[in-house]
Image (cartoon, rainbow, N blue to C red):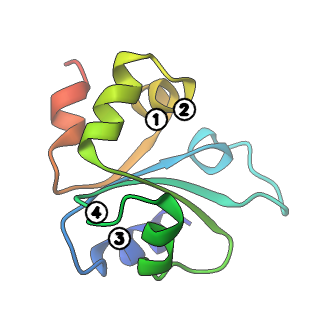
Amino acid sequence: MIEGVRKWAEGLPFKATVILIGSYARGDFNLWSDVDIILIAEFPERSPVERLMRIDHPPGYEVIPLTPEEFADMFGRKEPMIMEALRSGVPIKDDMGILKRYLRP
């Protein structure tokens, strides 16, 4: 599964940070699990729905499209999804340098 997400992420036509989260990242997925992904990029669209329409993703992928500013704001508020992504997410791609900036060595 991780290799499939990596291949999809490498095919994105823009710079992005991609983090696999949820059950696939934790290893407790099952037959009905979807593939949860945080996708951070410089989106011109303000609406997450418009952003998703721009992204071609495989069936079963639940993509959460964020700008770097939105990620930073959510990090500042210690949003559980963001904290989980940094704690136990699987880094797939980091063109935006988000992981370098927020992960502590």
* Residue type highlighted by circle 3: Ala
Question: Between marks 2 and 3, how big is the CA–CA gap?
Answer: 20 Å
According to the picture, the residue beneath numbered tag 4 turns out to be: 43
- Residues tagged 1 and 3 counted as in contact (Cβ below 8 A): no
Question: Between marks 4 and 2, how big is the CA–CA gap?
Answer: 20 Å
Q: Position of residue 102 (x, y in %)?
A: 24, 26
According to the picture, the residue beneath numbered tag 1 turns out to be: 85
In the rendered view, does 81 fall on the left or right side of 91?
A: right
In the rendered view, does 22 fall on the left or right side of 5?
A: right
Question: Which dot, 2 or 1, sits closer to the camera?
Answer: 2
65 over 11 or under it: above or below: above
- Point out the tag, 4 or 1, that comes first from the N-terminus: 4
Question: Which dot, 4 or 2, sits closer to the camera?
Answer: 4
Q: Residue furthest front?
A: 46
- Residues tagged 2 and 1 counted as in contact (Cβ below 8 A): yes
Question: Between marks 4 and 1, how big is the CA–CA gap?
Answer: 20 Å
According to the picture, the residue beneath numbered tag 3 turns out to be: 9
- Point out the tag, 1 or 3, that comes first from the N-terminus: 3
Secondary-structure class at tag 4 = loop
Mark 4 closeness class: few <14, some 14–19, many ≥20 residues within 10 Å: some
Question: Which dot, 3 or 4, sits closer to the camera?
Answer: 4
According to the picture, the residue beneath numbered tag 2 turns out to be: 81
25 over 86 or under it: above or below: below
* Residue type highlighted by circle 2: Met
* Residue at image location 46% in from the left, 35% down from the top: 85
* Residue at image location 51% in from the left, 78% down from the top: 57
Nearer-the-camera pick, 43 or 91 = 43
Nearer-the-camera pick, 13 or 26 = 13
